[in-house]
Amino acid sequence: MTHDAIYKVTPDAAKITLTTKEKAEADRARAKENPEEFWASVAQRLTWSKPFTKVKDVSFDAKDLHINWFEDGELNASVNCLDRHLEKHGDDIAIIWEGDDPDTHKNITYREAFEETCRMANILKARGVNRGDRVAIYMPMVPEAAYAMLACARIGAVHTVVFGGFSPDALASRINDCNAVAVITADEGVRGGRTVPLKANVDKALKQVDSVRFVLTIERTGGKVEMTPGRDLFWYNEARNDVAPDCPAEPMKAEDPLFILYTSGSTGTPKGVLHTTGGYLAFVAYTHEAVFDYRPGDIYWCTADVGWVTGHSYIVYGPLANRATTLIFEGVPTYPDASRFWNVIDKHNVEIFYTAPTALRALMREGDELVKKTNRSSLRLLGSVGEPINPEAWSWYHRVVGDGKLPIVDTWWQTETGGILISPLPGATDLKPGSATLPLPGIEPAIVDAQGNFLEGACTGNLVLTTSWPGQMRSVYGDHQRFIDTYFKTYPGMYFTGDGVRRDEDGYYWITGRVDDVINVSGHRMGTAEVESALVSHPAVAEAAVVGYPHDIKGQGIYAYVTLMEGTEPSEALEKELSKTVRAEIGPIAKPDLLHFTPALPKTRSGKIMRRILRKIAENHFSALGDTSTLADPSVVDALIEGRKNR
Ligand code: 6R9
């Protein structure tokens, strides 16, 4: 297979310094031989106010599930990301903020970031936010988003960042699920030259919420917003003037919660993935250094949004714990034009660049010239995350963006894993375009068949992890049973990822995508059940079934089959209305790409929708429908195929 062709390690070896093949092998061997010693040494990179003596106490047995790392140690995440760098490096740049408008940027030192974080921590405390309380953060990509996260961490409050593209309804349901007591937001966000009414969205959301007592609004644009007296404060014009730039940090137990991040699963409403303090921070700091060959002072840019786990782990916590200069980009890759990424790289001399395949595919379509006219000579490493990177996009990234010289780290991981698990180590791993390559030291993946039998050697099956790692999620917030049921029941004694995978003859892993009812749209996880429930909330809809289908830019698109109530006729107007409904219930990212009105859905005699068939039809694989004889009414399928062809 041509795609298996190997790119030998470090085509530009001089620029990769931390890892060598020998070191990587030694680390792997060490982690295998004595995992506790290995992970303890990883955790030593943090500053502990009380050192841990116990490394690990874990059971993956569903009857006695528990995951504890460095349990008797104490630390504070914001101290590790800020305070400990101040003495010698307070004037180093912590954050480069590049605004949506290409003429705006700001450099923020570690001392400034520390002081702003402390101020924000102080106002939270003054407004009665206590250790253990939940705080929702609904922000654009501005430095204040990082301060808000770190301010929560500083006082022991648990943040839950909600992506600024989510609707008021989606925001409300997340706030209600964790009973957040405060919200930190901005008046408006700015993206691609347009404003997003964040504060107005919060106001709408809070109509459905009882728990929130305090709303802090960062003035990003100065646009007019409504303020509820007694509940709402502006940051720059009000709150910030009354608080000191210094705030003692709460000593947290290693297993105290750091944050909750909602993510889509195959069933039900989004789950509140719970991460704790010590293990998570140690793991993201370690992986950020090892995978990105990170040395303090390097200028590093991850293009994700802080609303996703990638932003948490690899814009904020990992980089700042490592004293990185982390670039926060407010805008979009195509504004003011499709050279923006490469212009920003030149403007700030970015050395390490981490983005998503969907962005690369969109930019690839715009032609090489927009890349080639920029310099990019500061770059020394490229990264990819969020979905499988197709070999074409990989090769374009390598050849055009990296001028054929730079290693690419294709990093596989999940919200649940906290940080990267499978990825090349630059300087140590030969690359194959489209493969996330090998597990990091200390990570023990395995491949099982549908019955849970281990498969050996080259094989295809389901990806599981057989042992814990410090960055693993600890629970589903408020529903520990759901955590056990979702991840540890399918294959007893193992963590099930929900991903399919192939392992080749060299032991390289090739993630093939989700094997459950989760679809990955532009690197964003969507539960098909969520989109369905949004669709059926419209009075005209009787039933809806949503599946993914291959999409050139987005990776997967959303294909929605909809049956209408008796007496309602399909129309373009109704299609628009349904689209609007999904937007309102979830957000623009969940809008169906294709909406297919059908008089009936293929069902078994027991009434179960046959999604396998719907997937094949959406994929245009009409000849591969498999056995349709168990359908209650096989003629439904022919009608669906006709309907698909007209799209
Ligand atoms: C970090 C993040 C997780 C799902 C995961 C998988 C897909 C992520 C990937 C990848 C192939 C990669 N995924 N990285 N698939 N190669 N390098 O994206 O977290 O939003 O929770 O999504 O994304 O399917 O299960 P999250």
Image (tube, helix red, strand yellow):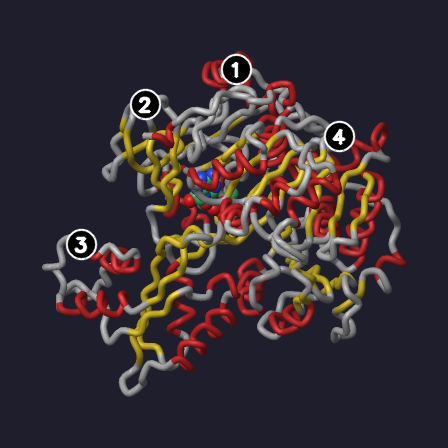
The amino acid type found where label 3 is placed reads Ser
Labels 2 and 3 touching (C-beta < 8 A): no
Quadrant where the C terminus is found in the figure: bottom left
Image quadrant of residue 300? top right
Image quadrant of residue 601? bottom left
Q: Is residue 202 above or below residue 504?
A: below
* Image coordinates for residue 534, horizontal then vertical, percent: 43, 69
The amino acid type found where label 1 is placed reads Lys
Q: Earlier in the sequence, mark 4 or mark 2?
A: 4
The amino acid type found where label 2 is placed reads Glu
Dot 1: few (<14), some (14–19), or many (≥20) neighbours within 10 Å?
some
Labels 3 and 4 touching (C-beta < 8 A): no
* Image coordinates for residue 183, horizontal then vertical, percent: 68, 61
**From mark 3 to mark 4, how far is it between C-alphas?**
56 Å
Say which residue label 4 marks.
297
The amino acid type found where label 4 is placed reads Gly
Provide the secondary structure element on which disc 4 rests.
Answer: loop
